[in-house]
Image (tube, grey):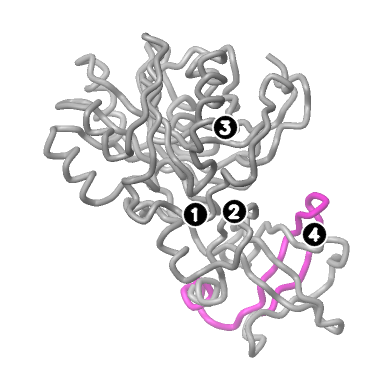
Amino acid sequence: MKLSNFNFNLPAELLAEFPAENRDEARLMVVNRKTQTIEHKLFRDVLEYFGEGDVMVLNNTKVFPARLYGNKEKTGARIEVFLLRELNAEQRLWDVLVDPARKIRIGNKLYFGDDDSLVAEVIDNTTSRGRTLRFLYDGSYEEFRAKLLELGETPIPKYINREVTPEDAERYQTIYAKEEGAVAAPTAGLHFSKHLMKRLEIKGVDFAEITLHVGLGTFNPVEVEDLSKHKMDSEELKITQEACDIVNKAKMNKNRICAVGTTTMRAMESSVSSSKTLNPYEGWTNKFIFPPYDFSVADCMITNFHTPKSTLLMMISAFCGHDLMRKAYDEAIKEGYKFYSYGDAMLIL
């Protein structure tokens, strides 16, 4: 399977810039691998496909306001700083992306806030756009984190061609988000409302939570024709014993296990035993799933519609079967389904 197998033309009007008014009223395409059929529903209709003892596995990562705007010392040039990961809490070192990068060199200082209440010094170059910053702030660590939250902006995806609104901070967060650390939302989960989760619970569906802090690398387009040569960025992952017990019990009882999102699927596939059960894990994963691939844990998944040439699309192809995935995407475009973060959803059975 080559990169060129994952290219398609996506009309610009199918990029969702706003979510459905009610989370669970997005459209849902139901793709059945066994019967090779496609149905059109609303997201809240997922209720029809799950019953007592089935498990939905959720990624409970929480997006933090990772986008800051600062000014360069002397010139005052406006610089966008995207916080990627904290390297050292005590020294306040962070890996970041800067834009425009050509203006930012080691030793430069950046000032944030109307009153310049936060200053950062560039201490290293990591990639063409990547830098390591040391934040200079007099208060306690808690006060420093509070200052980042105050100055930061919800990092809605770049393709959304509009200003960030205050509502985006809530819109771009799943209702079960708990563990702060992602720079992008695990978007399949954005479709769940409290009401829908309650109704699933009443039906006897169990929920298991894992944490995979989504990094920007997830969205990097693949640029090598030979997929085996693509390198994934590492993302932080935590799977508790409690989550494993819920999933493995359902698997033993032959109940349905649904991965909510590609990040959840990747997290589970990063820590499985030889007998295809889920193991606890705390660390990092750079697992890249592309066809052919034999999945170990989940037997169905919920996902959004993804970009051409993305690692996410490749995972869907591996899970769905390439021909059926292409058929589903052709139909989605024909039927006007919305793509990407705020778009519509797909349930693959």
Q: Which mark is residue 312?
A: 3
State the residue at coordinates (27%, 21%): 256
Q: Residues within 10 Å of mark 3 (few under 14, many from 20)?
A: many
State the residue at coordinates (69%, 27%): 7
Instruction: Decide which of tag 4 and tag 1 comes sooner along the chain.
Output: 4
Mark 2, secondary structure of its residue? loop
Q: CA distance from mark 3 to mark 2?
A: 15 Å
Residue 161 is covered by the magenta coloring: no
Q: CA distance from mark 1 to mark 2?
A: 16 Å
Q: In this rendering, would 98 be left or right of 170?
A: right
Mark 3, secondary structure of its residue? helix
Mark 4, secondary structure of its residue? strand
Q: Nearer the viewer, mark 4 or mark 3?
A: 3
Query: Where the C terminus falls, by quadrant?
Result: top left
Give x and y (percent) for residue 313. 58, 29
Q: Which residue is mark 4?
A: 124
Amino acid type, label 4: Asp
Give x and y (percent) for residue 291. 59, 15
Q: CA distance from mark 4 to mark 3?
A: 31 Å
Q: Residues within 10 Å of mark 2 (few under 14, many from 20)?
A: some
